[in-house]
Amino acid sequence: MAQQQNNDENAAVSHRRYTIGASGFDAPVLQPGLHVVATPIGNLRDVTIRALETLAAADVIACEDTRHTRRLLDHYGIRARCVSYHEHNAAARRPELLKRLEEGEAVALVSDAGTPLISDPGYKLVEDVIEAGFTVIPVPGASALLSALVMAGLPTDSFFFAGFLPHKQGARKNRIAELAGIPGTLVFYEAPGRLAASLADMADVLGDRPAAYARELTKRFETVERATLNELAANLANGAAPKGEIVILVGPPDQAAGEADMSDAAFSDRLLALIAEHGVSRAAQMLALETGLRRKDVYARALALQSDADNGA
Ligand code: SAM
């Protein structure tokens, strides 16, 4: 272990100190810069040693909610200086944090749960820190999206994190349609009260794909439901909304079904319409994205259709 265990009574008053159970440790001095620190998504033990060292040694911790972060800090005996950094005060707080970096300080950024910037505040701060020429240091750890992905039983070789969907049904369905052709597993964050409606809209727009939702990850009532979109939506249609925090995952479009569709009149009509408007190459690219088919296959079909049209077929 990089840090040295130190049971010396005097060390209890030193800065940069953290405890795990009854053991106390001194954290090494941090390099100046913005340290983006992942914290647990439920289970307080899901924190890395480096995250504890960073939180213990930072000159200041910018927290989404200081009271929330205090629970983690208290659990590990960390007496750090915290300031709030959330969507309502971010613009006002950024200059102050940048000034600290200018003075050579180490600033830690945390959110209430998981990895900052992942559907959480921090992107603009990182952008400004880079722009101002300071260092950004990631301290990786928990994130609900990866935990859900590895337990869902859906393909993991390629996935797309779509964050939260719009609340209004029209906008939500449009967004789902935009994602329909992505050839990978789709991952969404969702509030429990909107889970049933979102699953029903996904089933409507995407068809009956394999899917899952994971609830209360790393916590006492962690569960996962795996079924098709229609089944998941139907199971929730008349019941009470599940409680807790939720990640929805939807399997990729079925390539085999898509290939069969290539010969459909509707597919050809759509492709011809796109060719007329955008030309062969762009049309193939657009329809490949829409359907999840391979671009080179759609391109070959587009060329064949174009040639038929040129020959008056
Ligand atoms: N930054 C966090 C991360 O890295 O996962 C996400 C923050 S976002 C504001 C909160 C959403 O993440 C929740 O609404 C839920 O969709 C998901 N989430 C966070 N913790 C979770 C958990 N323990 N179980 C399931 N979903 C969780």
Image (cartoon, rainbow, N blue to C red):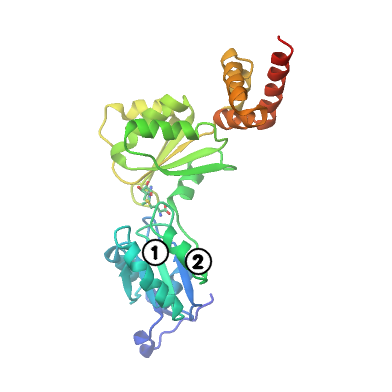
Q: Position of residue 180 (x, y in %)?
A: 50, 31
Q: How many residues crowd around disc 2 within 10 Å: few (fewer than 14), some, or many (20 or more)? A: few
Q: Secondary structure at mark 1?
A: strand
Q: Nearer the viewer, residue 275 or 29?
A: 275
Badge 2 is on which residue?
A: 131
- In the displayed structure image, the side of residue 247 where residue 271 appears, left or right: right
Circle 1: residue type:
Val
Marking on residue 110 = 1
Q: Secondary structure at mark 2?
A: helix
Question: In the displayed structure, would residue 20 be above or below residue 254?
Answer: below
Q: CA distance from mark 1 to mark 2?
A: 20 Å
Q: Residue at x 71, y 23 (%)?
A: 303
- In the displayed structure image, the side of residue 22 where residue 284 appears, left or right: right
What is the quadrant of residue 212 in the picture?
Answer: top left
Question: In the displayed structure, would residue 5 be above or below residue 212?
Answer: below
Whether tag 1 and tag 2 are in contact, CB under 8 A, the answer is no
Q: Residue at x 40, y 26 (%)?
A: 231
